[in-house]
Amino acid sequence: MSSLVRSSLVKAFFDLSTAESWDYTVITENSPKEPDQNKVWIGLTYMPDVPDVATLGDGGEDELEGILQLDIYVPIGKGEKEALDIAEGWARSLHTQLRAN
């Protein structure tokens, strides 16, 4: 079940990446890809929490929570503005999506 949560969060990130026309290499956990250390790249890691029972009985549901960690890597000496822009864009997108739901 947590794989569905992970998939949803990763999809949301890639949707934002497409909407913002970002052209960064994105590496998820267990990815065979090697990033170019001379360019900005993003590492995504999903860290699930222990599920809680939200409802009981037939059709009961568990509440699934977790963290999607974005590690934004910038080449040494290139500054942090681009990394901060990515992080702020992600936060703004999540805030907008949460308000819509």
Image (tube, rainbow, N blue to C red):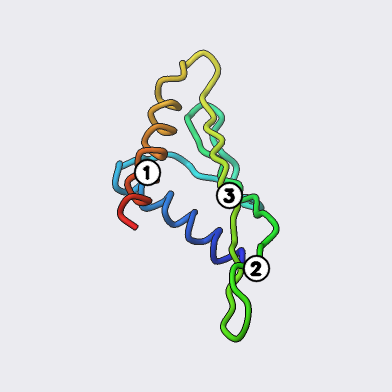
Disc 2 target residue: 53
Residue 69: x %, y % from top left: 57, 42
Q: Amino acid at mark 1?
A: His
In the image, residue 55 lies at what x, y percent?
Answer: 59, 73
Q: Secondary structure at mark 3?
A: strand
Q: Tag 1, which secondary structure?
A: helix
State the residue in front, 31 or 61: 61
Residues at badges 2 and 1 in contact (C-beta under 8 Å)?
Answer: no
Q: CA distance from mark 3 to mark 2?
A: 28 Å
Quarter of the figure that contains the N terminus: bottom right
Q: How many residues crowd around disc 3 within 10 Å: few (fewer than 14), some, or many (20 or more)? A: some
Q: How many marks?
A: 3
> Residue 95 bears which disc, if any?
1
The crowding category of the residue bearing disc 2, from other C-alpha atoms within 10 Å (few below 14, some 14 to 19, many at least 20), is: few
Identify which residue is drawn at 54% across, 66% down: 4
Q: What is the residue that sits farthest to the top in this orientation?
A: 77
* CA distance separating discs 3 and 1: 23 Å
Quadrant position of residue 56: bottom right
- Residue 54 is left or right of residue 94, and the answer is right
In the rendered image, the residue lying farthest to the front is: 56
In the rendered image, residue 14, in percent from the top left (x then y), is placed at: 41, 51
Identified by mark 3, the residue type is Thr
Mark-to-mark CA distance, 2 and 1: 26 Å
| Image: 32 above or below 71 | below
Kind of residue indicated by mark 2: Val
- Label 2 secondary element: strand
Answer with mark 2 or mark 1, whichever residue precedes in sequence: 2
Point out the tag, 3 or 1, that comes first from the N-terminus: 3
Q: Measured along the vertical axis of the image, is residue 53 above or below residue 35?
A: below
Query: Do the numbered discs 3 and 1 sit on residues whose CB atoms are within 8 Å?
Result: no
| Disc number placed over residue 28 in the picture, else none | 3
The residue under the point 35% across, 51% down is 97
